[in-house]
Image (spheres, helix red, strand yellow):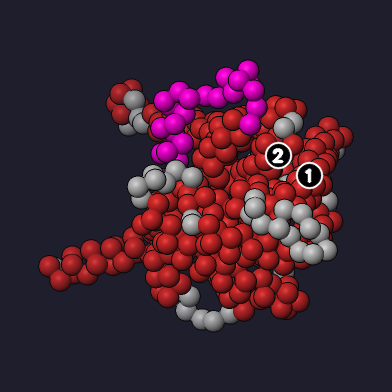
Amino acid sequence: MADGWATKRARACVSCALRLLCAVDSRWLDVSISLSMYSLVWRTFSWSLDAFDTDVSTLRDTSTWVIHGTNIMSYLGLLLLVFFPPVYIVQTIVLTLRAHPEHFVDHIFVCAQFVVAVLTTISNFSGTVDLVLVPLVSDLLLHVWQWCAVLSACVAVLALPLYITASRPRVWHMLWLPCVVCSASASDLSLVLQAQDASSLLSLGFVMWGASIIPGVCFAVGHIRRSLRSFELPTLISPLSVVSQLALGIMALGVQSKRVWGGTVGPATAPLLLGELAMAAGAVLGLVLWAASAAWFVNAHVLVAWMQWSHGSSGWSISVCKVAYPVASFTMATIYVARVWSARSALVCSQFLIAYLSFVLLIVPVARAAVSTARLIRRMCKKRVTSDRRLPTYGTIQSM
C-alpha cells in the first residue's frame, strides 16, 4: 500500500511539473517586454518634457503612485526575463522529443523575442543607474549588449533562408526587430559609458540600423498586404513595431551623436561637425518613418472600425501583449519627435497614446478578469440551483 501511494504521489508530482513546463512559453517574454516598454514610455515622456517651457513641464506627473508603479512594472518584467531562459531550456529538452523543422523556427522566434526583451530592459534601466554604480554596471551592460548584437545578427542572417523554406506564414518582420531595437538601445546605453566607448557603440548602432531598414520595411509591407484579409487589430498594427523602432532608433542615435560627437569634424566631403550632421539626418529620417507609422496607425483603426460598421466583423478583439508593444513603440517614436522637433502637437499625441496604452495594459485585463469571474460565479450558481431542484423533497420520499 505504501509503495502504491508513493508511486501515485510521484506520478502526480511529475504531471504537475510537466504542466508547469507547458505553461512557460513565449507569452512570458511578451509580458516582460510589455511591462518594460510601458515603464520606458513613462520615463522617456517625463525626460522629454524638459525640452519645453515651464508651462508644458507642469504636465509632468511626479506623484508617488506613478513612480512606484513604474518601478514595480520594471522589476516584474526583469523577474520574468531572468526566470524564462532556464525554464525554457528545460522545457525544450524534456518536451521536444523529436526534431522537426518547425520547432527550429519556433526557437528562432523565441530567441528574437528574448533579445528584444533583454535590450528593452537595458534601455529601461540604463537611465536609472546611480552615478556611483556607473563604473560597475556600464561594463556589464556593454557586454550584454554585445552578445545581444551578435544574436540579433545571427537571427537576421537566418531570416531569409527560414522564410523561403517555411511551410506556413509567420510574422517574419519580427526577425529583424532585434537589430532595430539593438540600434535604439545603443543610444540609451551610451549615457553610462565613457566617451570612447560611447563613440564606438554609436557607430555600431548606426550600422545595425542601416543593416535592418531595408528588410524590415519590406517584410513589414508584405505583412500589411497579408493582414488586409483578416481585419484584426493586433495583426494590422504589428508592422508598427519595426517601423516605429526604426524611427525611434535613428532619432535617438542622432540625439546622442550630438552629445558624443559634438566637437568632431566630419569627412572632407562634408566639413561639418559630425554630431550636428548626425542629428539633422536622424531628425529628418525619423520624421519620415514616424509619419509612415502614424499613417498606418490611423488607417488600421479606421479599417477595423469600417469593417465593424459595414460587415459586423469583430476586429476589436484585443490581444494585450500583441497590441501593447507596437503601440508603445509608436508612442516612444512620437515622444522623440516632440523632443527633437520641439513639436507640442506631437507631445499632445504622445499623451493620447499613453492613455491608449494604459487602457490596453491596465483596464482591458482587469475587465476581462471581472467578466470571467462573473461568468464563473453565474455558472456555479446555475449548477447549484439545478442540483437543488434534483434533490428529492420530503413529500416525494414519503410517497416512495
- Pick the quarter of the image with the C terminus: top left
Residue 241 shown left or right of residue 80 in the figure: right
203 relative position to 34: left or right: right
Relative height, residue 82 to residue 143 (above, below): above
> Main SS type for the magenta part?
helix
Considering every residue shown, the one lying at the far right of the view is: 310
The residue that appears at 61% across and 74% down in the rendered structure is: 154
Q: Which of 59 and 311 is in front in this view?
A: 59
Query: Secondary structure under badge 1?
Result: helix
57 falls in the magenta region: yes
Magenta residue check for 68:
yes
Image location (x, y in percent) of residue 390: 41, 32
Task: Give the extent of the magenta segment.
Answer: 51-75
Q: Which kind of residue does numbered mark 1 sit on?
A: Leu
Q: Report the mark closest to the observer, 2 or 1.
A: 2
Give yes or no for contact between labels 2 and 1 (Cβ–Cβ under 8 Å): yes
Residue nearest the observer in this picture, 323 or 150: 150
Tell me the element at label 2: helix
Q: Can residue 262 be seen in this view?
A: yes
Residue bearing the label numbered 2: 340
Neighbor class of circle 2 (other Cα within 10 Å; few <14, some 14-19, many 20+) is: many
Say which amino acid is labelled 2: Val
Other residues around mark 1 within 10 Å, as few (<14) / some (14–19) / many (≥20):
many
Check residue 205 in the rendering and tell me which mark sits there, or answer none.
none
3D distance between C-alphas at marks 2 and 1: 9 Å
Q: State which quadrant residue 141 falls in.
A: bottom left
Q: Which residue is drawn at 48% across and 75% down?
A: 96
Tell me if 326 is positioned left or right of 311 in this view: left
Q: In this view, does 393 lie above or below 98?
A: above
Residue 287 bears which disc, if any?
1
Q: Where is residue 57 in the image (x, y as percent from the top left)?
A: 59, 23
The quadrant in which the N terminus is found is: bottom left
